Image (spheres, rainbow, N blue to C red):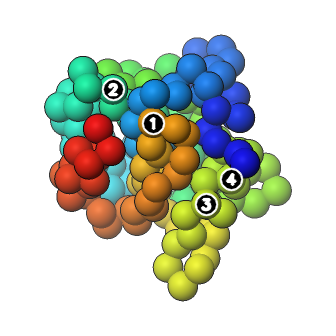
Amino acid sequence: MTTIADFTVTTNRGEPLDLSAKLGKVLLVVNTASKCGFTPQYDGLEKLFQQFNDRGFEVLGFPCNQFGGQEPGNADEIAEFCKVNFGVTFPLMAKVDVNGDNASPLFDWMKKEAKGLMGSTSIKWNFTKFLVDREGNVVKRYGPQDTPASIARDIEKLL
């Protein structure tokens, strides 16, 4: 059986991150973008991170430029935008594709574990969120319209 621990991703500094190091934490994995109508969700994601981090919760942001070219910046520009505009302190990863032939293996796996509306595996837009339990299993998928605050109760249950 596959869990999030079977994947290695790249941080926004270009360093590999073995996600087995995240076992024991509850994770919210999000594909993000800086120039999207949902971009203000960075604020809510940071609030969740601050609220639950000391209890073993972490947000992992994965910038993605696949939807309307809404994440055109490089890693430094994205990190600076997130810090200056939303005070983001949760980890940001390297820019990824979440759909298609070049999709991140992590996102391919999560999409199969928690399908979208009507059984779809494709991610439809920025700020799709995947909740992962302490054992590394995908528990639930949330669409872009699901605000971070609306997910707090589900996070609380896993903590």
Q: CA distance from mark 4 to mark 2?
A: 23 Å
The amino acid beneath tag 3 is: Glu
What's the amino acid at mark 4?
Answer: Trp
The residue lying at 32 percent from left, 56 percent from top is: 38
User: Disc 4 designates what residue?
Assistant: 109
Residue contact between numbered discs 2 and 3, judged by CB atoms under 8 Å? no
- Distance from disc 1 to disc 2, alpha carbons, whole Å, reads 9 Å
Amino acid under disc 1:
Arg
Residue ID at (64%, 32%): 5
Horizontal and vertical percent position of residue 148: 26, 51
Residues at discs 1 and 2 in contact (Cβ within 8 Å): yes
Residue 70 in sight = no
Residue at 52% x, 72% y is 116
In space, the residues marked 1 and 4 are separated at their CA atoms by 17 Å
Q: Amino acid at mark 2?
A: Gly
Secondary element at tag 3: helix
How would you rate the neighbour count of disc 3 (Cα within 10 Å): few for under 14, some for 14-19, many for 20 or more?
Answer: some
Q: Position of residue 78 (x, y in %)?
A: 45, 30
| Residue annotated with mark 2 | 56
Instruction: Give the mark nearest the N terminus, 1 or 3.
Output: 3
Q: Which residue is mark 3?
A: 113
Corner quadrant of residue 8: top right
Check residue 134 in the rendering and tell me which mark sits there, or answer none.
Answer: 1
The mark nearer the N terminus, 1 or 4, is 4
- Give 5 or 72, whichever is nearer the viewer: 5
